[in-house]
Amino acid sequence: MKCFLIKSLSCCFIIMAGCGTIVNKSRSNKQLGFVPFDDNHIQYEGRIEHKTDAAYLYWPGSTVRIKFNGTAIKVLLKDFNGQNYFNVIIDGVVVKKIRIDSVKKMYLLADSLEPGVHTIALFKRTQINKDYNRGYTKFFGFQIVGDGFVLSAPARKKRKMEFYGNSITCGHAIEDTTGTDSGQSFFENNYLSYAAITARNFKAQYYCIAESGIGLMAGFRKEIMPEIYNRTNPFDSLSSWNFDIYTPDVVVVNLLQNDEAVFKQPQSDAFKRRFGNRMPAEQQIVRSYQAFIQKIRSHYPKAYIICVLGNMNITQAGSPWPGYVNRAVADMNDRKVLTHFFPYKGAPKHPLIKDHELMAASLTDFIRANIKWQ
């Protein structure tokens, strides 16, 4: 196909015939080459909300992607309070991470690239969390620098996965090698979590609904997962996610770590807020877990649902929690609801990169052995 050049008195445009489009190629336009957030050349992955001013990126793993022909590109962003980090991925390779400021501004993602076609992705490393005072990031668009031009969005991956979890799934403290198990956003990297790695192993789209401290029945957040799992914006109780937008083939649920911790502290505010002075019976725990899995099933009638636990102390020898999950799943009598437990990693604190790699390998092997998908 050929590109045909049409000239006018004040500006010039390139009409796309299979080779791409120069966006806003007007001599008087101050945002030469700007591709706004609502342009269909931009591809999104994750629960992302489009408002009139920008795309709002809430959950860890939220990804924005563009394909273009050129040598340099920028992005226009603004963060809730400057605590979110993103990985910059060029042609499938993570090249750097950037912290997003609370002031709206441009960030240089790449320059001096080899001339030709490139795909740029921004991957949200960090979670949204009220207790951490960490919020959303607003994405306004990409700025293609120089004579580059945007191309049609890459083909979407056919396979789809979705994960529900707590700090483990977020990748909390995954890069903290100091031993302090820090909750600072600098050390968090959902891209290297077992969840994101597993999705990449299967070349699957990736949606991640996870927050540190969240529980199924009780946790260290005021809200529990059954109260936020169906939201676009977890901060907003009126923000309802449309489950018809994305239907995963495989759903992975990794919860109860925080429930286990709260149940050990019956005098704590977190416990009393949910249970008062009465310890829940085992049957109540089993039924509560089963009820949440059935909620997931109601949205995704054909999906495989894998109930996982670990790899922190919830799966150490003598823990009753794997038994609760096994009972809940057995009672459902649903052949597409499976269990898979990661072994206890043998040490306190959150898993590091190597631990997540082991979990990803374990889950990947389990899926390959038990699930047939296209």
Image (spheres, rainbow, N blue to C red):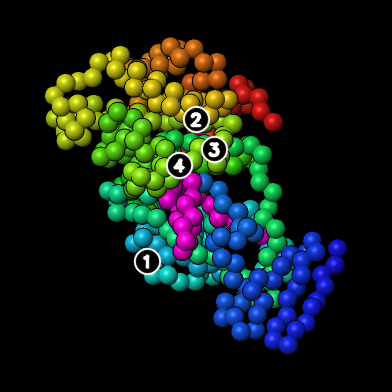
- Numbered range of the magenta stretch: 47-67
Q: Which residue is mark 2?
A: 299
Q: Which residue is mark 4?
A: 241
| Residue at x 71%, y 67% (from the top left corner) | 21
Is 73 displayed left or right of 162 in the figure? right
Ranked by sequence position, the earlier of labels 2 and 3 is 3
Depth-wise, is mark 1 or mark 4 nearer the camera? 4
Q: Give how far apart the Cα atoms at labels 1 and 3 are.
A: 33 Å
- Is residue 99 at all visible to an observer of this figure? no
Q: Which residue is mark 3?
A: 244
Ranked by sequence position, the earlier of labels 1 and 3 is 1
Is 273 displayed left or right of 34 in the figure? left
The three-letter code of the residue at mark 3 reads Asp
Residue 230, horizontal then vertical, whole percent: 42, 38
Residue 14, horizontal then vertical, whole percent: 75, 73
Residue 352, horizontal then vertical, whole percent: 43, 42
| Residue at x 54%, y 25% (from the top left corner) | 301
